[in-house]
Image: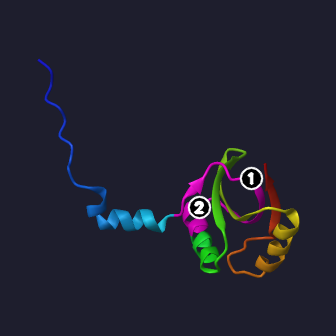
Amino acid sequence: MDPAPEKISAESPASNTEDMATLDSQPLVLESLLPGWYVQVAADTSREEAGKRHQQAQAKDLPVQLQRTIVNGVEYYRTLVGPYSTKVVAKTKRQSVEVESFVKGTPFLKRVQ
């Protein structure tokens, strides 16, 4: 005789507002990026820290992406502003974001093809 099927909750994900708020507060982390020029403004090992930087950049109306990567066995979350269509535009944007509080280190350009 087969075991009884497992019961599945009929609760819709939207009915649990606490879980939805947590999902909404976490920015989408990408493995790959759209082609273009980006300004990398930080690389954090903490997703939470990267999420804070993401929110700060969004508050400045910047197009910002988080990219997850592994370097020498360590997981990083890159905070990238962009994409921009040309290196010239990305370079100009780099100069304007250098003074922002969410920048960690010296921003640099990154090209994704």
Q: Residues within 10 Å of mark 2 (few under 14, many from 20)?
A: few
Q: Quadrant of the N terminus?
A: top left
Magenta range is: 27-51
> Image point 17% across, 40% down: which residue?
7
5 to 76, vertically: above or below: above
Which callout, 2 or 1, points at the residue further toward the start of the chain? 1
Q: Position of residue 23 (x, y in %)?
A: 43, 62
Q: Nearer the viewer, mark 2 or mark 1?
A: 1
Image quarter of residue 87 = bottom right
Tell me, yes or no, whether the two marked residues, 2 and 1, touch with CB atoms within 8 Å: no
- The extreme right residue here reads 88
Is residue 90 rendered to the left or right of residue 58? right
Sort mark 1 into few (<14), some (14-19) or many (20+) by Cα contacts within 10 Å: few
Front residue of 90 and 68: 90
Total labels drawn: 2
Q: Which residue is mark 1?
A: 35
Q: Position of residue 24 (x, y in %)?
A: 44, 66
Mark 2 sits on what residue?
46
Q: Residue furthest left?
A: 1
Is 7 located above or below residue 85 in the figure? Answer: above
Q: Quadrant of residue 76?
A: bottom right
Residue drawn at x 64%, y 77% is 61
Please check the rendered image and state whether residue 37 is part of the magenta-colored stretch, yes or no.
yes
Residue 63 shows which numbered tag?
Answer: none
Percent across and percent down for residue 80 are: 70, 63
Q: Residue furthest top?
A: 1
The amino acid sitting under disc 1 is: Pro
